[in-house]
Each structure stands twice: as structure tokens, then as C-alpha cells.
Image (cartoon, rainbow, N blue to C red):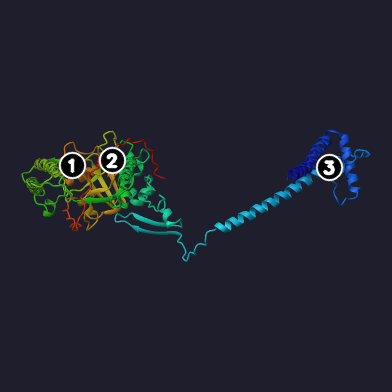
């Protein structure tokens, strides 16, 4: 057994020696061929001899039959085909290697295929319905007139188990968009809203060379943007579309003699408010007992008569109700603090009504401007309460004064008498003019030093004089006569059940007016 093993090992060694010798021979040939011209010549001779030598059918064992070295004649070197044997040898070796590699790869692929067939999952069931794709959209209007576009976008996804864990698999997006309007700065744009304005006021275009866009226009729309941001989470609290676009322009105009004019184009809103016991000792019970009716206006004067303000009785009843609530044992500390504060306010208001009188919107023609404009002490064009003004709508011209302050997010408000005169049948539940087609001209600094009981005839005469300073009225146009008895506004519709209280008035926003550009009346 040991003898046989030794013989087998000896045979393995002898069988491996030829391959080692062949590798050394190839290396010697390559080196010699590269650096020795004689070697190249020898290889060429070997090739020719091999090509013409007979093929032996049985290979001879190098260990058993030693070969006698043969010396070949050395033919002349062929400089053209010197590299051909080496190239053929390299090509043959490469072909053998590629064939071996292909064989191995085929075996590996066959093994992988068998493995997949053994572990392959069963074929899933066929989906019997088409998964939805695309967008479903709709547009409707909110109660405040804003078009609301809703879209439902859907697409196929992963399994419910996977999609439920993804944050963005089921979302809703809400977006408010608003284009900020540019101010009208040309006669063409202005007369689109108020036709024949240059005929009603022949000297109006002469005010433009020294005029410019009021910083109040930019401030107004900044206030609207701020309001939208504040109320963007509550659709019902957003500005209505008419109120978002209530102002067509605000201009600061000047004639050659220095007369300044605050010009504004806007819509017209109005409400019922104000009180004066001397001129209206009796008021409707719906106003006297209302918690929403405001008996005050910024324009006011010292009371001259002895008739009490009719609103006092209604506010005194509210005080009595408040005191009764304070005596209730179940009142909470928070509610008690709120009622105490309200009682202090009511008592102070009653004392004011005993000493002062106020405009009555159903009787007195006046306009309302944002409080931020009225309180701008640095702007020489900024109107003040009591300044004289003219309202132009259609072919009519109405003299009036600036009588009250309003919110900083809206313009175009006037007294109920003004609204009911412009539009027959107006009531406080609607706009008098729902588009920015009313022109307002205010003469800054024209108000009286001391406020007094409204004198409508005097107001008309004063406005006519001021209009004369900027060119006067055109032929065929005249001011409205307010001495004609006032037409009572239409009664308000019944309030809706559960109507929310009016939002509190916002504080004055900080503003920094910027220099504005000059106007070109021919643009």
C-alpha cells in the first residue's frame, strides 16, 4: 500500500513538470523575442518547421523518452512579420481563456436558475379593477364672495399597511391667492370708474403734473395682506372679494397755487350710527336697545340743547342687567371681571353722551376714512376729521365732510344718508356701490377750527368755493342740495340667528410712507 502511494505521488510530480517547463519556456521566448533579434529568427524557423512536420498521433512521455535537441537552420529575419508569432500565441491563449470563462459562467447561471425556481413565490392574483388616476376639481363661491377651488388628486401607491405609515400619503393643502392691484394713475383708468370726471371737473387734469400716488394706497393693501395672514385659518373671517378690491386708486394732487387734494376712487359701504338728542330726541327702539348700535362718531361738538341723548336710556338698562348678573352667586371670577369692565365703559359712555353730541348717519352726509390715514400727522395731504370733501358718483356731485374713522383694511365708507341718496332702497346689509366707481375728493386742512352743529347749507357753500380753487364745476353740473329733507333709509333685514359679534378694531399698523412717482394724465 505504501509502495503504491509513493508511485502515485511520483507520477503526479512527473505529470506536473511538463507544464512548469512549458511556462518557463513561454516566458523565456517572450523575453528573448522582445529583446533578442536572433530569438525572433529562431521562432520563425520553428513555426515553419512545425507547419511542415507530420502530426504524431500518440504523444510521447517526456520522462520515458528523452528528446535529442534539434538545431534548426537560422533563416534571414523578416522585418515585416517579426511580431506575428507572438500575436498569434497571445490570440490563441486569449481564445482559450474566453472559452473557459464562458463555460464557467454558463454553469453558474444554471445553478442560479435552479435556485430561483426552488424559492420563487406563487404568482399574485390579478387585480380585477382599474386603480384611479388623475384630478377631480370643482369651483364654488364662499359666502364672502371668494371663489374656492377644491381639487382631489389621487394616484396608485403601495399597500395600505405601508401608506398608513407615510406622512405624505394622505394630505390636504389650503392656499389663499390674491393679486395686488396697481393704482389707477391716468385719466383713462380713472374715467373707466367715474366717466365724465374731466367734464364734471374741467381743472382736474391740471392737478396731475404735480401729483403722485399716495403712500396710503400701498399702506392699505399692506393692511389687507396682514389681515389675510392673520385670518387665513378661518375661511369665513377672510376679507370678502369686494372688500379686497375696494380701492381703485389714492392720489395726492396739487394745483399751481398749492391747493392740495386727496383723491380716492373706491366703492361705497355705509352703516347706521351716531346720536344727537338735540336734533333727534327719539330713535327707533331697535337702535336704542341694540348692543351693536354705535352712538358715537369722531366728529362731535359740545351739546347745546337740554334734550337727553335717546341712547342713554338703553345703556342704563344694560348697566342694570350687568349689576344683576354680578349679584348672582354662580358667577365665575373671569365673568365678574369682564362685567365689571363693561360697566365702567358703559358709565363713561353715558357721561360723554350727556356732554357731547355726534353726527347721525341717517341725517348727516359724511364720509369715513381709515384711522391710519386720519392720524398721519406728518403727511400734508392726509385728511383730518372735519375737512370738507366732495363725492362724485355718475353725474352727481355731493358735498360733505370727513366725519368718522374706520378700519385700516377697507376704504369707501359713508353715512347712511349719503348711501340712501346715491342708491334708492339701500339698507345697511348691502353695499351702496359694489364696485370702486365712486370718486372722493378731500381738501386737507379745510376743516373748521371748532366743530359745531352740522350746517348742511354751509357745507355746500364751502365745498363749492374749494372746487373753484381747482377749476370749478363744468357746464351743466351742480352740487346736490342737502337742505332737501332726508329720505329715511330702508329698514334693516332681521339679523340671522347666532350672528357673531363684530371683530374688535385693530390697532394702527406701523407704516413708513415712501416717496411716490409723479403722474402722467395722458397715460
Label 1 crowd bin: few (<14), some (14–19), many (20+), radius 10 Å: many
Q: Residue at x 21, y 40 (%)?
A: 385
**Mark 3: which secondary structure?**
loop
How far is mark 3 from mark 2, CA to CA? 136 Å
* First in residue order: circle 3 vs circle 2: 3
Q: Is residue 419 above or below residue 387?
A: below
Alpha-carbon distance for marks 2 and 1? 25 Å
Q: Mark 3 vs mark 2: give the one in front.
A: 3
Q: Which residue is mark 1?
A: 299
Residue 423 in which image quadrant: bottom left
Which sits in the foreground, 306 or 460? 306
Q: Which mark is residue 469?
A: 2
Q: Which residue is mark 3?
A: 63
Residue at 35% in and 55% down = 148
Residue 126 pos. (x, y %): 50, 64
Q: Sequence-wise, which precedes: disc 1 or disc 3?
A: 3
Q: Nearer the viewer, mark 1 or mark 3?
A: 3
Tag count: 3
297 or 27: nearer the eye?
27
* Coordinates of residue 320 in the picture (x, y in percent): 7, 47
Horizontal and vertical percent position of residue 224: 32, 45
Front: mark 2 or 1: 1
Amino acid at each position: 500500500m505504501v509502495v503504491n502511494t509513493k508511485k502515485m505521488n511520483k507520477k503526479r510530480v512527473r505529470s506536473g513538470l511538463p507544464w512548469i517547463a512549458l511556462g518557463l519556456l513561454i516566458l523565456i521566448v517572450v523575453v528573448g523575442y522582445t529583446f533578442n533579434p536572433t530569438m525572433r529568427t529562431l521562432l520563425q524557423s520553428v513555426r515553419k518547421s512545425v507547419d511542415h512536420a507530420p502530426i504524431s498521433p500518440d504523444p510521447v512521455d517526456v520522462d520515458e523518452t528523452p528528446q535529442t535537441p534539434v538545431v534548426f537552420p537560422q533563416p534571414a529575419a523578416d522585418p515585416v512579420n517579426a511580431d506575428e508569432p507572438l500575436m498569434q500565441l497571445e490570440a490563441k491563449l486569449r481564445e482559450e481563456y474566453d472559452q473557459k470563462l464562458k463555460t464557467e459562467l454558463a454553469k453558474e447561471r444554471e445553478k442560479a436558475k435552479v435556485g430561483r425556481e426552488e424559492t420563487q413565490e406563487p404568482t399574485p392574483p390579478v387585480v380585477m379593477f382599474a386603480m384611479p388616476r388623475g384630478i377631480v376639481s370643482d369651483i364654488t363661491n364662499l359666502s364672502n364672495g371668494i371663489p374656492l377651488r377644491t381639487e382631489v388628486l389621487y394616484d396608485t401607491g403601495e399597500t395600505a399597511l405601508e401608506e398608513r405609515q407615510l406622512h405624505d400619503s394622505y394630505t390636504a393643502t389650503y392656499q389663499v391667492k390674491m393679486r395686488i392691484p396697481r393704482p389707477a394713475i391716468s385719466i383713462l383708468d380713472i374715467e373707466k370708474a367715474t366717466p365724465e370726471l374731466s367734464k364734471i371737473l374741467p381743472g382736474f387734469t391740471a392737478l396731475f403734473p404735480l401729483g403722485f400716488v399716495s403712500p396710503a394706497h400701498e399702506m392699505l393693501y399692506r393692511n389687507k395682506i396682514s389681515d389675510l395672514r392673520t385670518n387665513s385659518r378661518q375661511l369665513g373671517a377672510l376679507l370678502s372679494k369686494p372688500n379686497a378690491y375696494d380701492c381703485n386708486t389714492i392720489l395726492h394732487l396739487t394745483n399751481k397755487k398749492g391747493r392740495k387734494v386727496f383723491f380716492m376712487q373706491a366703492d361705497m359701504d355705509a352703516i347706521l350710527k351716531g346720536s344727537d338728542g338735540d336734533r333727534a330726541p327719539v330713535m327707533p327702539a331697535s337702535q336704542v336697545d341694540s348692543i351693536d348700535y354705535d352712538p358715537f362718531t369722531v366728529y362731535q361738538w359740545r351739546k347745546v340743547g337740554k334734550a337727553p341723548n335717546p341712547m342713554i336710556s338703553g345703556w342704563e338698562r344694560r348697566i342694570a342687567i350687568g349689576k344683576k348678573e354680578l349679584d348672582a352667586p354662580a358667577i365665575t371670577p373671569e365673568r365678574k371681571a369682564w362685567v365689571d369692565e363693561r360697566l365702567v365703559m358703559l358709565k363713561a359712555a353715558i357721561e360723554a353722551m350727556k356732554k357731547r353730541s355726534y353726527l347721525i348717519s341717517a341725517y348727516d352726509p359724511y364720509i369715513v376714512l381709515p384711522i391710519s390715514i386720519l392720524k398721519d400727522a406728518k403727511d400734508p395731504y392726509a385728511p383730518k376729521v372735519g375737512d370738507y370733501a366732495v363725492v362724485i358718483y355718475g353725474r352727481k356731485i355731493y358735498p360733505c365732510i370727513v366725519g368718522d374713522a374706520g378700519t385700516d383694511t377697507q376704504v369707501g365708507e359713508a353715512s347712511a344718508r349719503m348711501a340712501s341718496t346715491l342708491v334708492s332702497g339701500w339698507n345697511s346689509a348691502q353695499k351702496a356701490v359694489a364696485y370702486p366707481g365712486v370718486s372722493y375728493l378731500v381738501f386737507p386742512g379745510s376743516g373748521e377750527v371748532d366743530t359745531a352743529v352740522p350746517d348742511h347749507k354751509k357745507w355746500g357753500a364751502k365745498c363749492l368755493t374749494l372746487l373753484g380753487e381747482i377749476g370749478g364745476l363744468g357746464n351743466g353740473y351742480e352740487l346736490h342740495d342737502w337742505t332737501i329733507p332726508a329720505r329715511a333709509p330702508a329698514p334693516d333685514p332681521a339679523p340671522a340667528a347666532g350672528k357673531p359679534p363684530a371683530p374688535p378694531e385693530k390697532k394702527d399698523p406701523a407704516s413708513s410712507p415712501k416717496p411716490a412717482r409723479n403722474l402722467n394724465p395722458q397715460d
